[in-house]
Image (cartoon, helix red, strand yellow):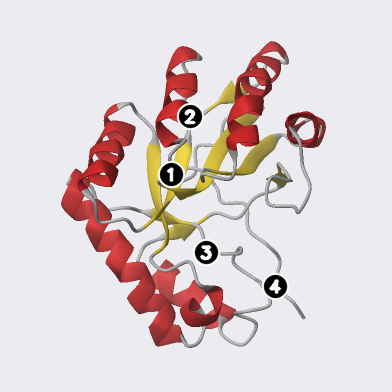
Amino acid sequence: MYEDVPNSVYLTFDDWPSPITEDILKVLKEKDVKATFFVVYNDSPDAAKILKQIVEEGHSIGVHSTTHIYSQIYSSVEAFLSDFEVTASWIEEVTGIKPEILRFPGGSINIYNEGIYQTIIAEMLRRGYLYYDWNVDSGDAARYYSKHSIYNNVIKKVEKKDKAIVLMHDSAQKKVTLQALPDIIDSLKASGRTLLPLTNQVKPVTFSYVN
């Protein structure tokens, strides 16, 4: 049974790890907020250290991708499952915790997986994993964005949702996202929102199937 919290907001960061991850964690710690990181494989000692830190500080970890190359990941069902398993196994090996949630690269339905998305979604659910898309896009994956635009995108879109899952990115190119984060958190808290990490007890927000 799902245990959704009214007026909840789930801050999620795709593409971890990056040079700004530790700074994101500092902001979250200072603001006493737990978030969710969807991980891209990085088998290095530094990445393992930060992965452990994320878990120790109470944030959620989900699988995102090993290669993050859409054309490879979605070339077949088998290719997707192989890509997923490498990162899932790595997370469990480093943290001792088996991940239970994932975010499909590009979202659960995209132009790269049109022919196989129903099959891979069904298989992941059969294996006991829940997947989470988003209903609030910060816009930090757009070609042009600013601290101001990211802030406005999140705050204005969250206002329209009882439960908001916010897409942001954790990569070297997203320093502006980091800069906007403190103000976003302050505004959400001031508006009475509860900021939480995703777990498999949260009812997923998912994209609609294409007819």
Q: Residue at the location (60% across, 64% down)?
A: 106
**Percent position (x, y) of residue 205?**
62, 52
Image-quadrant location for residue 78: bottom left
Q: Nearer the viewer, residue 204 or 182?
A: 182
Amino acid type of the residue that numbered disc 3 sits on in the rendered structure: Phe
Residue occupied by mark 1: 18
Residue at disc 4, secondary structure: loop
Q: Which dot, 3 or 2, sits closer to the camera? A: 2
Badge 1: how crowded within 10 Å, few (<14), some, or many (20+)? some
* Residue at the disc numbered 2: 24
Using the image as rendered, state which of residue 9 and residue 67 is in the foreground: 67
Q: What amino acid type should be assigned to the residue bearing mark 1?
A: Ser
Q: CA distance from mark 1 to mark 4?
A: 32 Å
Label 4 or label 2, whichever comes before in sequence order: 2
Spatial CA span between label 2 and label 1: 10 Å
Residue 19: horizontal and vertical position, in percent?
A: 43, 39
